[in-house]
Image: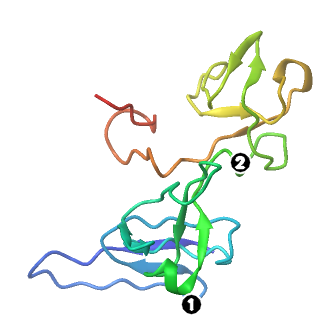
Amino acid sequence: GLLAHAFPPGSGIQGDAHFDDEELWSLGKGVVIPTYFGNAKGAACHFPFTFEGRSYSSCTTDGRSDDMLWCSTTADYDADRQFGFCPSERLYTQDGNADGKPCVFPFTFEGRTYSACTSDGRSDGYRWCATTANYDQDKLYGFCPTRVDATVTGGNAAGELCVFPF
C-alpha cells in the first residue's frame, strides 16, 4: 500500500489528514523509513529507539559485524527485539533486469571497476549497479534504492546523494 506521513501543523494552525484504511501512515516529526527482512514484517522504523541503553534517531550499524544499516520498529529494541534493515543496495535493487537481486561490489562496467552505485552510462542520472561481478559480460543490473543515510529532499541536485564533508 501507499505510505503516507503527516506532520502536525504549526502552532495555532488547524488541520487534519485523512487516509484510507489500507494505507500505511504515521504522524510525527521524523522521516518514515520502511524496513526489509528482519523480524518486524516490514514495519517502519521507530525513531527515536533505544538499543543497549543508547538512543538512536536514525538507522545504525551498531551491534552488527556486516555494516548493514538497521533500526528498531519499536521504541525499545532491548525490550521488544523487533527490527528491520533500512533500504540499501546491499539488500535489493529496483527495476532493471535482475529481479531485485542486490548489487555486487566491486563490479566491472566498460572495463572500469566500481565499488558503489553509479550513474555512469546513463543520461537520466539514475544510480544503478551490476548484480554480478561483470556487467560487461552478464548485462544484469538494477537501480539502487535511496539510502536513508544520505537522502536528499528538495534542493537543486536532482536527487544526488549528499557528500560529506561539504
**Which residue occupies the extreme bottom position in the image?**
21
Residue type marked 2? Gln
Rendered image quadrant of residue 37: bottom right
Q: Where is residue 5 in the image (x, y as percent from the top left)?
A: 42, 72
Residue bearing the label numbered 1: 21
Looking at the image, is 54 positioned above or below residue 117? below
Q: Where is residue 72 in the image (x, y as percent from the top left)?
A: 52, 73
CB-based contact (under 8 Å), mark 1 and mark 2: no
Residue found at x 53% / y 48%? 147
Q: How does the figure colour the protein chain or chains?
A: rainbow
Residue type marked 1? Asp
Q: Residues within 10 Å of mark 2 (few under 14, many from 20)?
A: some
Residue found at x 84% / y 23%? 134
Residue 150 as seen in the image, left or right of residue 145: left
Which comes sooner in the sequence, label 1 or label 2? 1
Q: Name the residue nearer the viewer: 41 or 75.
A: 75
Residue 152 as seen in the image, left or right of residue 40: left
Which SS class for mark 2?
Answer: loop
Q: Position of residue 142 (x, y in %)?
A: 74, 39
Residue bearing the label numbered 2: 94
Q: Name the residue nearer the viewer: 127 or 9.
A: 127
Residue 117 as seen in the image, left or right of residue 157: right
